[in-house]
Image: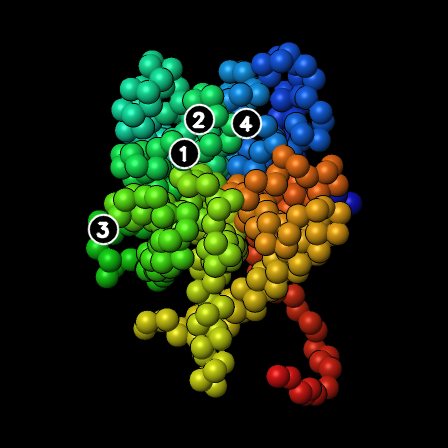
Amino acid sequence: MNKLTKRRLQPLQVLTLGYVAVILIGTLLLALPISNRQGVWTPFVNALFTATSATCVTGLVVYDTFLYFNVFGQLVILMLIQIGGISFMTFIVMGAILLRRKIGLFERTIMAQSAGLSNLGGVVKLFKRILVGTAIFELCGTILLSISFVQDYGAVGLYYALFTSVSAFCNAGFDLMGASGNEFVSLTLYRDDVLVNITVMALIIIGGLGFVVWGDIWDKRFRFRNFRLHTKVVLVATALLIFIPAILIAVFENDATFSNLTWGEKILAALFQSVTTRTAGFNTVDLTNLSDSSVLLMSFLMLIGGNSGSTAGGIKVTTFVVVVFGLWSSIRNRQDINIGKRRLDLSLTRQAIALLTIYLGALFVSTLVICAIEPFGLSQVLFETTSAIATVGLTLGITTQLTVASKLILIFLMFAGRMGVLGLAVAFGKTHDSGLTKRPLEKILIG
């Protein structure tokens, strides 16, 4: 019995293997000749790159989604985005509900870890909300986007609207705007379309907040004072991380990338570029023309990402907030970390710093290696690696020119970005009894 218990997969292992299985199935389907317009076999690495990018809701691509893949290939990518965005566990729950099967403790544990929850209470209810909420938000997004897309592309614009809505809500960054005949244009053709911009930004923000936050907002009937501390922190930090960077981007690009835009278009473009760094991957201006200041700022924002338990990636907003308040407490020589009228567990600071350190370490090593084997500059490579590990999908135009080795590194970063934060949170969240014997206490000089 003990041997069988030891051999049983842990919840995190089940999640990891589940995502690997989804990626491999997607790779096989996308590699088939029936998935692309040329009717040829797609190179394995490129198919794997695309499947990983879709499942990990990143958005980095080596092919224009519309111009290379046919409808079958596009639907495969769309399904991978949906599965990766709201977790394949959501679909398992949906199947269990339809089949009227009981969801056991082990399954509930996997679901809780998948959603970033620390306990099992109400996890099934949350996943039901995820299913209903996802359907509502994506349907509303489709309806609003179709107003512009149907006008430009006819009836097929409804399909483009659905694809864009799902991709935006899941923070994936894939698009079908290659239908315009231009390659890798994202939403640059709609930079002055207020409806498209606001709709996509709203979907990105909603998906990036996560249903734990939206559930709290709904349960408390939108009364801010009654929200949990987690919800308050996420809402305030998200607002600050959108509007302050938008102002900075507008200043940095006023006489550069935005020089030919009207004031209204400049405001819209600055706001969109700030929002899309929430790990969405869309863009409404040519990012290759951005100033170094904007590139550095957007890299920083991509690293932060969205909220825990959402469709977004990055180290997460709450991790960033905990690090900032932890540093502030250290500067003021205080033992406790206080946010408002609440005190945080000090273990959260260790977890947050550990996550940030590992992310930065992975970025340093991957950027170092890719810079050594590719002819691109540091800013381009750093932007690319940050985009990959934070599952963003923004690029300065070098993705298609990378060698196989660099693509494999980005594939690993995308997968680590989707699974790594969860794995590290679970690993560092466990406390282990160190026994009765403790080592002698000693101090070393730092700083």
Camera-near label (2 vs 3) is: 2
Picture residue at 30% right of the left edge, 37% below the top? 192
Q: Report x, y in % for residue 165.
A: 38, 31
Task: Give the mark nearest the N terminus, 3 or 4.
Answer: 4
Q: Is residue 229 left or right of residue 329?
A: left
- 22 or 102: nearer the viewer: 22
Residue beneath label 4, please?
A: 64
Q: Is residue 192 above or below residue 77?
A: below
Q: Element under label 1?
A: loop
For the N terminus, the quadrant is: top right
Rendered image quadrant of residue 126: top left
Q: CA distance from mark 3 to mark 4?
A: 41 Å
Amino acid, disc 3: Phe
Residue beneath label 2, please?
A: 177
Residue beneath label 3, please?
A: 222
Picture residue at 60% right of the left edge, 16% below the top? 36
Please state the total of marks drawn on the protein image: 4
Q: Report x, y in % for residue 375.
A: 70, 46
Q: CA distance from mark 2 to mark 3?
A: 36 Å
Q: Report x, y in % for residue 179.
A: 45, 21
